[in-house]
Image (tube, helix red, strand yellow):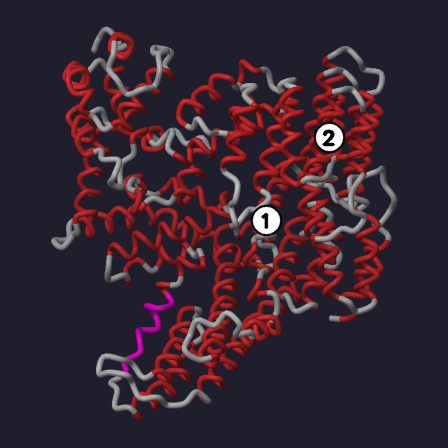
């Protein structure tokens, strides 16, 4: 592989040409990475290419060098994913054939490394002493360790290791007179398909599932995992599922609901799920993006008011509605999250950003004061607030000085700071556009924003200038944007918008944490972690080492299975595969899409027809039956859902029930109207509050959201009922 690496590095050095000022001079860092690779320091090279990749996003030279350095550093997963991304970008690249061979070699290497880790675990388990079981109900410990290795190996399809582990486990069991029966290998592999996200294989394996509930839960688990990093491939399978699968807390996958809502699904089920916690989060994020795009308030204020009725502590929404004092107080009240110790700093900066977007200078000042109070000194976060404050005050030189007053070194922490600074610079640039300070806006874009956003922002600036009748500089700006984009992308130009979207999709996949995190970094790293028993929770250090090696080996196997699963989801762009393989995988995917709905519906029916359902499952069945009937306009089922709703129980949420009630009143259903007016006061308070929010959203109710049925609530109910079509 050495010739391959050297030749590529020389070729890529030509791409490193100077460009206009960036937030970080990624070209210099890129050159440092090339030099580190030439010197044989592939760990340093991989780190630098990773940082530069975050700045440029779609530069084929950076992506390819990142893959090469990762391969030489022992991270086969990151390498093979970067090479796959490279071929999605340049399927006809001059070195495409060599890249395909390298992907094939790396995939074989991953399998070999997985086996190596399993063998290390087996070797350690062989040395473990034979200890008699503590009781008649206990398993021999050595046998259990070996059996666990066998289970892991079967789960990832490594039959060679599994057979050896089972043979050794049997020998240990015989010593203690224990009747050892290993689990079924095919079943263990099948049960691991959801962990690997192989939804296609799961659907194919449906006839082999003895337990219908297991199949249902495996489908949801697989789709849940995939939706995090491959939403485009997940959505068609989600849409093919019967929606009754996704209707109870115990059996609902929130990421899938978000995915469906984000895709604009008009399915009645998702419509009635509106305003649950996931929907609010999604709309809150959309709202902030809209405000920071400097859209007119009339385009987002109604949604902001709806969000605030349901989430009064939404920091972003409060800031957008000029309530920065309350927003910052909530930030301080929620301090102390050990998993995000800088959350209050980032949230305070977000308040400042939103305040700039709506022209609330006082909000920026308050946020800056809070940031200085949080740290007792200037930090990157407080400097960001200063950038925003100086921009609002018209002091562009001071704003840019605050932007550049940063640590000179670029490491993973600074990379995170670059994300924040780039976002702040984009907001500042748009604020300057809004004030028609176009020269200042251009300076902020060129000196402050991240490389991959610079060109689009320059084009946005040109559009704004043309809208204002200022066309003298727009041609220059667009030419400059094209030149910067060419440099940032290393000369790569997508053939179409569709190809660019495909590249962005695979970039998201390639950067997923599975492919370059912890146990998948390298075998040496996995062994090093296994030998570190400082945090051992087992009886002996030997058990820690054996189980850690076993876990690492299984992780390697699962991640390789995930790669194979992704190829099944998008074979059209898997150009590293042969045309015949891609055609076969496309056919398999098509068949799985056709089967997933019928198999899921059949499995659900079998499961809920069982005699031994527990109370939660019985409740779920009842809710599900009435939910589906209510979606079709059955008023009796709407009334039953009101009765079934219990804030202390899972399976049914107030926003959904309130939505069904509102739909029934809009249809002019007299029996439902009478039930609502007579029983409203007896409903659980969360349902009363939510129904009042729905009435407020309709513009029929303007009093306090208090859950009481006073004149205002009664009038709003009558107004909604009266809006029904005369035929009803």
Could you classify mark 2 by the number of other residues whose Cα lies within 10 Å: few (under 14), some (14-19), or many (20 or more)? many
- In the image, farthest residue toward the bottom: 175
Q: Position of residue 167 (x, y in %)?
A: 37, 87
Could you classify mark 1 by the number of other residues whose Cα lies within 10 Å: few (under 14), some (14-19), or many (20 or more)? many
Quarter location, residue 277: top left
- Which mark is first along the chain, 2 or 1? 2
On screen, residue 173 versus residue 568, left or right, reads: left
Residue mark closest to the camera, 1 vs 2: 2
On screen, residue 392 versus residue 32, left or right, reads: left
Q: Position of residue 542 (x, y in %)?
A: 47, 81
Quarter location, residue 116: bottom right
**Which span is picked out in magenta?**
180-189
In this rendering, the answer to whether 46 lies above or below 360 is: below
What is the total number of numbered labels drawn onto the structure image? 2
Q: Which is nearer the eye, 494 or 441?
A: 441
Q: Verify whether residue 431 appears in magenta.
A: no
Q: Which is nearer the eye, 219 or 723?
A: 723
Q: Quadrant of the N terminus?
A: bottom right
User: Pointer 1: what residue?
Assistant: 506
In this rendering, the answer to whether 513 lies above or below 267 is: below
In this rendering, the answer to whether 329 lies above or below 674 is: below
Q: Position of residue 259 (x, y in %)?
A: 45, 39
Q: Position of residue 566 (x, y in %)?
A: 51, 54
Identify the element where label 2 is drawn. Answer: helix
User: Pointer 2: what residue?
Assistant: 386
Identify the element where label 1 is drawn. Answer: helix
Q: Quadrant of the C terminus?
A: top left
Residue at x 58%, y 35% (from the top left corner): 347
In this rendering, the answer to whether 367 lies above or below 16 is: above
């Amino acid at each position: 592989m050495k010739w391959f690496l050297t030749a590529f590095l020389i070729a890529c050095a030509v791409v490193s040409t100077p460009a206009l000022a960036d937030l970080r001079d990624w070209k210099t860092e890129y050159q440092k990475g090339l030099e580190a690779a030439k010197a044989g320091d592939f760990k340093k090279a991989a780190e630098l290419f990773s940082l530069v990749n975050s700045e440029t996003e779609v530069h084929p030279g950076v992506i390819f060098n990142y893959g090469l350095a990762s391969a030489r550093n022992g991270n086969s997963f990151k390498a093979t994913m970067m090479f796959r991304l490279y071929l999605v970008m340049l399927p006809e690249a001059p070195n495409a054939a060599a890249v395909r061979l390298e992907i094939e070699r790396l995939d074989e290497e991953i399998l070999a490394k997985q086996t190596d880790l399993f063998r290390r675990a087996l070797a350690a388990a062989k040395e473990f002493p034979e200890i008699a079981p503590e009781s008649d109900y206990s398993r021999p410990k050595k046998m259990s360790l070996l059996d666990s290795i066998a289970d892991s190996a079967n789960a990832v399809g490594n039959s060679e290791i599994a057979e050896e582990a089972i043979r050794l486990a049997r020998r240990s069991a015989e010593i203690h007179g224990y009747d050892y029966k290993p689990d079924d290998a095919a079943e263990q592999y099948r049960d691991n398909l959801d962990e690997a996200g192989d939804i296609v294989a799961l659907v194919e394996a449906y006839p082999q599932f003895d337990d219908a509930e297991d199949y249902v839960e495996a489908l949801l688990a697989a789709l849940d995992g995939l939706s995090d990093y491959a939403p485009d491939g997940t959505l068609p399978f989600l849409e093919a599922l019967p929606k009754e699968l996704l209707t109870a807390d115990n059996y609902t996958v929130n990421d899938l609901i978000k995915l469906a809502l984000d895709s604009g699904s008009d399915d009645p089920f998702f419509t009635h799920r509106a305003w649950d916690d996931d929907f609010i989060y999604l709309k809150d994020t959309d709202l902030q993006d809209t405000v920071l795009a400097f859209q007119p308030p009339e385009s987002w204020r109604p949604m902001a008011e709806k969000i605030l009725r349901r989430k009064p502590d939404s920091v972003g929404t409060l800031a957008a509605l000029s309530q920065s004092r309350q927003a910052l107080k909530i930030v301080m009240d929620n301090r102390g999250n050990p998993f995000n110790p800088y959350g209050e700093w980032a949230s305070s900066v977000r308040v400042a950003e939103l305040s700039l977007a709506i022209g609330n200078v006082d909000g920026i000042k308050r946020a800056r004061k809070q940031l200085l109070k949080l740290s007792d000194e200037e930090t990157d976060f407080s400097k960001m607030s200063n950038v925003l404050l100086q921009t609002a005050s018209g002091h562009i030189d001071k704003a840019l000085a605050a932007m550049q007053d940063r640590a000179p070194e670029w490491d993973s922490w600074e990379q995170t700071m670059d994300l924040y600074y780039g976002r702040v610079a984009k907001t500042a640039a748009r604020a300057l556009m809004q004030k028609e300070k176009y020269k200042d806006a251009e300076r902020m874009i060129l000196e402050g924003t991240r490389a991959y956003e610079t060109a689009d922002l320059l084009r946005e600036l040109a559009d704004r200038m043309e809208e204002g009748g200022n066309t003298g500089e727009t041609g220059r700006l667009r030419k400059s944007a094209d030149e910067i984009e060419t440099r940032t992308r290393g000369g790569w130009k997508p053939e179409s918008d569709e190809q660019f979207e495909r590249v962005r999709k695979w970039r998201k996949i390639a950067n997923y944490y599975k492919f370059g995190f912890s146990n998948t970094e390298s075998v040496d790293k996995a062994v090093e972690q296994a030998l570190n028993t400082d945090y051992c929770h087992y009886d002996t250090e030997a058990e820690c080492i054996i189980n850690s090696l076993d876990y690492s080996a299984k992780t390697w196997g699962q991640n390789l299975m995930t790669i194979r699963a992704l190829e099944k989801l998008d074979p059209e762009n898997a150009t590293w595969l042969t045309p015949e393989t891609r055609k076969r995988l496309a056919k398999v995917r098509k068949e799985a899409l056709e089967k997933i709905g019928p198999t899921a519906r059949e499995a659900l029916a079998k499961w809920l027809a069982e005699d031994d359902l527990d109370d939660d499952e019985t409740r779920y069945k009842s809710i599900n039956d009435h939910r589906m009937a209510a979606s079709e306009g059955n008023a009796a089922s709407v009334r039953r859902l009101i009765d079934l709703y219990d804030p202390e129980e899972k399976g049914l949420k107030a926003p959904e029930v309130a939505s069904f009630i509102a739909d029934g009143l809009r249809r002019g259903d007299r029996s439902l109207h009478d039930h609502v007016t007579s029983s409203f006061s007896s409903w659980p308070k969360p349902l009363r509050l939510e129904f009042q929010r729905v009435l407020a959203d309709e513009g029929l109710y303007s009093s306090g959201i208090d859950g009481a049925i006073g004149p205002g609530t009664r009038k709003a109910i009558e107004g909604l009922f009266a809006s029904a079509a005369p035929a009803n």
